[in-house]
Image: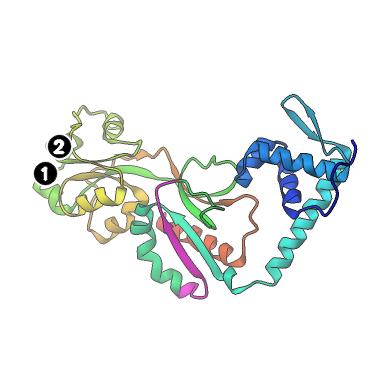
Amino acid sequence: MSRIHSGPIAVRALEIFDVAARLGSFTAAGAELGITQSAVSRQIADLEARLDVQLFARSGPNLSLTPKGRELAAGVGQGFQQIATSLAKIRTPTEHIVTLSMLPSVAAKWFSPRLGDFVRHHGDIDLRISVGRHLVDFRAEHIDAAIRYGRGDWPFLNATLLAKEEVFPVCTPEYATRNSLCVPKDLAGATLLHTDILDDWSAWFRAAHISVEVPSRLPRMEDDNAVLQAALSGQGVALGRSVLVADDLAAGRLVAPYEMRIPASYDYWFVYPAEKVPTPALQEVKRWVVNSFDKLAGN
């Protein structure tokens, strides 16, 4: 390889090389860094030209580090780790800020009632809640961490299980009495409130081994908070997700007329980018979230 470039090597090029070396794939590196595979390839080619060294051996779709590449990867990885450690030691006030993303229903039914507890125990942390139904782009949206509802198999994320969930009918005590909801088949005469969760009324009725025709033309709400509010207003029976209805059940605002519950397809997870070095503030937020979910489950 002949040298065709000269001059200083950009830190960005070394960052891209570090990610590509760690993941063993230009495509995966591009996905983690938020750039295209071709942009990664160009940066690596430019770095190899500047160093006059081949860093990766390419054989069709396979990619591996050369001996020189492994040597550079070890040094660059150690260097970035030292930089991260140094930055952590000279914490600036901005490191007291943590932006946490979550679903609107989780923000309304789980976080809001626990806001005071967080402030009492962590008043020095500037916690900012970002609410949305989409999978956030952590880097582009400046999100530190998220409470996600899923299977925990997101690539390039550090995921900690917070809670598994169950799904079951809930309504107000008055609605249950007024409609004589004594056994599951009594739901045939009730207004069934619909949302867009995978574990719907048909799944619950199948698990209960009863045949009830589920109306398809009733209003369907995509937000669990909205459907639970309808239930709290005495409009009908909702399929409650155990984490979201726990406080309302404990306070007696809602009741579960039947013992039959089905496991939800998804669970709750605390996630943040795998390459992120969590600040002490983020570690404290994670610890509080985990403890709060444990208390909710009675652990």
Q: Which residues are magenta?
A: 120-134
Residue type at the position of mark 2? Asp
Q: Which mark is residue 186?
A: 2
135 on left or right of 62: left
Residue type marked 1: Ser
Estimate the x, y position of residue 253 in percent, counting from the top left. Answer: 22, 58
- 117 or 8, nearer to the observer: 8
Question: Does 68 sit above or below residue 117?
Answer: above
* x and y percentages locating residue 194 in the rendered image: 24, 40
| Marker disc for residue 41 | none
Q: Residues within 10 Å of mark 1 (few under 14, many from 20)?
A: some
The spot of residue 66 in percent (x, y) is 85, 36
For this view, does 19 lie left or right of residue 179?
A: right
Which residue shows up at 50% across the image and 70% down it? 126
Could you say where residue 298 lies in the image, as x and y percent from the top left? 42, 57
Q: Residue at x 32, y 40 (%)?
A: 261
**Disc 1 designates what residue?**
180
Q: In front here: 266 or 148?
A: 148
Residue at 58 percent across and 47 percent down: it is 157
Report whether 296 appears left or right of 22: left
Q: Nearer the viewer, residue 131 or 281?
A: 131
Question: Disc 1, disc 2: CB below 8 Å?
Answer: yes
Residue 106 can be seen, yes or no: yes
